[in-house]
Image (spheres, helix red, strand yellow):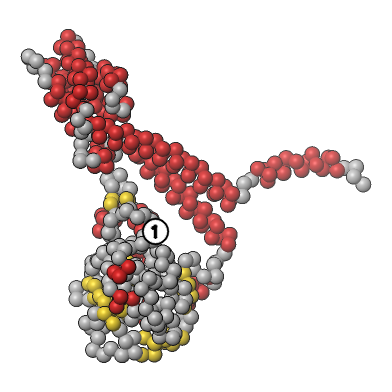
Amino acid sequence: MFRHAPLAVVLLFPLALPLAGREDPLARARRAVEEAEASLRAVQTKLDAAYKAVEQDHALVRSPEWPAKASPYRVAILAEVERIRKDANHSPREGLRSAFEKAGFLSPLTADRLAAALVDPLRKAAAGEGAVDAARLLADAVEKVLPGEDARACWEKAFLDLPVVAEYGQARAALDRARAELAALEKAAKGPAAEPEGMVHVPRGRFRFGPWTGLDYDLKRNRAERVRLEGFYIDVHEVTNGEFRDFLAGLGKKEQVREWLPTGFRLLEDGRLVLPDGGEKLPVRSVSYQAALAFARARGCRLPTEAEWEKAARGTDGRTYPWGNELLKDAANYLGRGVGGPVPVGSNPKDRSPYGVLDMAGNVSELTSTLAGRKPAKGKLKATDAIIIRGGSYADDEKSLSTTYRWQIPALGGKKDTVGFRCAVSEKEWKRRRR
């Protein structure tokens, strides 16, 4: 019965080899991410070492100890000038670099750059007659190689052309591509999610809309209404610095990035974005309506309407605050807490709406997609248009904690340090995508 089995195994074994060696696409993508992360860490280590060297060198040449330690550098300069005078074809760079490294006070990176910066000045000095002012030549070269008031300014003015800086950018881009590929494969493997990630569902139905507190310049009538909304999803948290940084990094247009830079962000010459102190989890703020809308569209979302924002904040029972009808002075990040600035999203769990949406009373106020006059912000905006802002912020008093607090900023380019945003998507649109 099994007489031919060995022969069958022999014949099938070559066919099995390619199958056994074929790696699952998800496993391959995960491995690619791990390798890209390892490469980025390695480059980051080199970049950190280079920056630390520059930082130490910059501090040294501006310290009281530098004049005494500069003596061997001045001696090396004079020696190389004499060599050039004896041999016009002599190249002083290697001699200077070797002498500077031997002195040991400056890093090899700075020693090499200092030597390169001195080549032309030394040739000019050797061509002249009389004594050479080595101290002045050294001081000029030091100012050229280590400029700026601090190490960060020095780095940005003189060291962004380092190969390791370009290498870091390439490694960062490779990791972003690997992560994007992995995310796409994981999403395809899981299929459509039941709910959008990071959002909660607000079901369709009626709720009590208004009356409003705050700055209601556009309201001729200010009274409560029963308004019916279709179901929608809304972000649990305000959009963060880290999320907005990733959005800007994907634009690929420095001019657009500069126009949309929020409070505290910096765009370096090498294209890297530096976040404000406090980091990735702080709510992004000072974002124009146009920039917020572009972010939302890139996520496949939109900004919530004013009515959607209010329903998500107060539910269907018409509550005064997201957590209920009683004022809790320790619930939200507002002026009365004395924090003086935004805190990482979700840091105040008591500031929670009936649907589980966080930070709607405080932290930062939020953009909506509704114009003053309760018109939707559609089509071309006019210079006189204003966008409705909802919710209080860290800089507002306790009146702003109300679910009915509203004010406005110019729709075209209007920004304010206390204003951020969150995204929404209609239930109908989400179901359409899942089909």
Q: Is residue 241 left or right of residue 2?
A: left
Q: Give x and y (percent) for residue 421.
A: 34, 68
Q: Is residue 181 left or right of residue 290?
A: right
Foreground residue among 231 and 226: 226
- The number of numbered discs placed on residues in the rendered structure image is 1
Residue at the spot 48% in from the left edge and 41% down from the top edge: 38
Q: Residue furthest right?
A: 1
Residue at the spot 34% in from the left edge and 39% down from the top edge: 165
Task: Classify mark 1: helix, strand or loop.
Answer: loop
Q: Give x and y (percent) for residue 313.
A: 40, 77
Q: Is residue 161 above or below residue 359?
A: above
Inspect this view and state whether residue 358 appears.
yes
Quarter holding residue 191: bottom right
Amino acid carrying label 1: it is Lys
Q: Give x and y (percent) for residue 76.
A: 22, 17
Inspect this view and state whether residue 310 appears.
no
Quarter holding residue 82: top left
Foreground residue among 266 and 30: 266
**Which quadrant holds the C terminus?**
bottom right
Residue at the spot 18% in from the left edge and 32% down from the top edge: 143
Q: Which residue is mark 1?
A: 281
Foreground residue among 83 and 211: 211
Q: Is residue 87 above or below residue 398?
A: above
Q: Residue furthest left?
A: 130
Q: Give x and y (percent) for residue 142.
A: 20, 30
Q: Is residue 147 above or below residue 233?
A: above
